[in-house]
Every structure is written in C-alpha cells, then in structure tokens.
C-alpha cells in the first residue's frame, strides 16, 4: 500500500482529512509519518492520536536548507514514503526535496491557481474582488504554487464574505479535494504530460 509522508506547519486539518479517508478505506494509502517544521503545530497531536509517528524538524537546527531537507528525506525513507503531501507546510520547498520527489510531491492551495499564489490566497481573492475563488491540488515544482494542476474546485465569493468566512468555505472543499487527489495517485490514475495532468479512467 502507498505510504504517505505529510509535511505540516500548523493546524493540520487537511492532514486529518487524509488520515480519515485512508482509515475509512476510501483511499488505498496510509499516512506513515508526519513532519512539522514547528514544534507547536496542532497537526502533530492529530497524528499521535492515530498512532502515526510525528516528528519535529526545525530549520534553525540545521546548517542550511539542503541539510534540513536531507534530514526530512532520511525520515521519509525510513518510513518507506512514496508520496509526499504538503498540508499547510509554510516553507518553500528546496532542491533536495524536489530532486527526490519529482512527480511524487503534491500541495493544496486555497485559491484557483494560477491566481493568488503564495500566502493568504483567500485574502488576496477578497482584496482583488473576484466573484469565484476555490481550491487547487497540484504537483510541486521549483516555483511557488506553479506545478501541474491535479484537481480544482470553485468556491463562490459572497457579498458579505470576510477572510474568515471565505476561508471556512474553501477549507470545507479542501478536505474533500485533497483525499480525492491522493486517491487518484494511490490508484495509479495520474500521468503528468508537461503542464497537464491526465486522469485515467
Ligand atoms: C489550508 O487552507 C491550506 O490550503 C493552506 O494553509 C491551510 C492549512 O490548513 N496552504 C497554503 O496557503 C499554502 N500556500 P491546515 O493546517 O488546517 O491543513
């Protein structure tokens, strides 16, 4: 069965959605290990509650980004990880991880990419005044939220939305879309062709 390594920085609600979908048998995969770059990330507690090893690796304890990412790879290798999911991991991924997990590392972003990449995608959408925003799950490449798109869901922006209310409605969709994307990968149904991701029947 496909083993997933999840990288987090905080709350970990998308991690929870993936764990739940795997445990229910909806996704033929298993979360094998969770790594956080922050010691106080609540997602670590979520992992522990499910008996999943939860590891804190703080960048400040390493001489540079390469050394930090080599340590992550070491932990993932030991756990037999074949797919890396970034779930609210608020760091730009570097060369080591990119090299090792090309086509095997995915991310979720709270906007319809290529609109509103980077931080605070929901606030960027509100400030711009778009009527529709949403969620994107994509493969990770060397850019910031620029990799080939796997799945997207649209979420309407309502007249009286605040950053909080829009984020909540987007998050609801994130929790559906991320497990769906993991399922497609676990079932071997995705092919990357240049910028396009083909979904096989
Ligand atoms: C989610 O909304 C995710 O899309 C976003 O951070 C939140 C993490 O929540 N990620 C990004 O903005 C990445 N650029 P979670 O920790 O509860 O899953």
Image: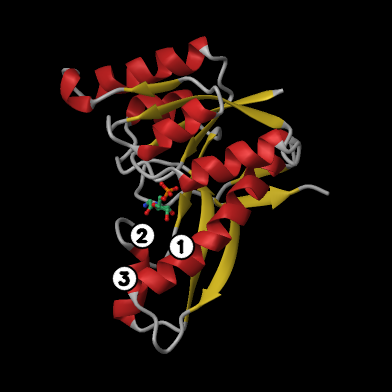
Camera-side residue: 96 or 107?
107
Gap between marks 3 and 2 measured at Cα:
9 Å
Residue that carries the numbered disc 3 in the rendered image = 124
Q: Earlier in the sequence, mark 3 or mark 2?
A: 2
Is 30 positioned to the left or the right of 115 in the image?
right
Q: Residues within 10 Å of mark 3 (few under 14, many from 20)?
A: some
Q: Residues within 10 Å of mark 2 (few under 14, many from 20)?
A: some
Is 170 positioned to the left or the right of 82 in the image?
left
Q: Can the viewer see residue 101?
A: no
Residue that carries the numbered disc 2 in the rendered image = 117
Indicate yes or no: mark 2 CB to ligand 1 under 8 Å: yes
Name the residue: 67% across, 35% down. Answer: 22
Q: Vertical placement of 52 versus 187: above or below?
A: above
- Residues under numbered marks 1 and 2 in contact, where contact means CB atoms less than 8 Å apart: yes
Residue that carries the numbered disc 1 in the rendered image = 113
Name the residue: 57% across, 15% down. Answer: 80
Q: Closer to us: mark 3 or mark 2?
A: 3
Camera-side residue: 147 or 17?
17
Label 3: element kind? helix
Q: Closer to us: mark 1 or mark 3?
A: 3
- Residues under numbered marks 3 and 2 in contact, where contact means CB atoms less than 8 Å apart: no
Location of residue 192 by image quarter: top right
Image location of residue 26, percent across then percent down: 75, 41
């Amino acid at each position: 069965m496909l083993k997933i390594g999840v990288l987090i920085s905080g709350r970990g609600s998308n991690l929870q959605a993936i764990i739940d979908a795997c445990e229910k048998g909806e996704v033929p995969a298993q979360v094998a290990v969770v790594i956080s770059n922050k010691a106080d990330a609540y997602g670590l507690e979520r992992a522990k509650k499910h008996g999943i090893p939860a590891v804190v690796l703080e960048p400040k304890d390493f001489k540079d980004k390469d050394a930090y990412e080599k340590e992550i790879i070491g932990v993932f290798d030991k756990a037999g990880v074949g797919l890396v999911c970034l779930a609210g991991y608020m760091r730009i991924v570097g060369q080591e991880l990119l090299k090792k997990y090309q086509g095997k590392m995915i991310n979720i972003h709270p906007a319809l990419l290529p609109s509103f990449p980077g931080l605070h995608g929901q606030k960027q959408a509100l400030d711009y005044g778009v009527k529709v925003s949403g969620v994107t799950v994509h493969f990770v490449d060397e850019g910031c939220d620029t990799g080939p798109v796997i799945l997207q869901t649209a979420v309407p922006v309502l007249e009286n939305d605040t950053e909080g209310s829009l984020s909540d409605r987007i998050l609801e969709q994130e929790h559906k879309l991320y497990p769906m994307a993991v399922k497609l990968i676990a079932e071997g149904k995705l092919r990357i062709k240049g910028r396009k991701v083909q979904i096989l029947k």
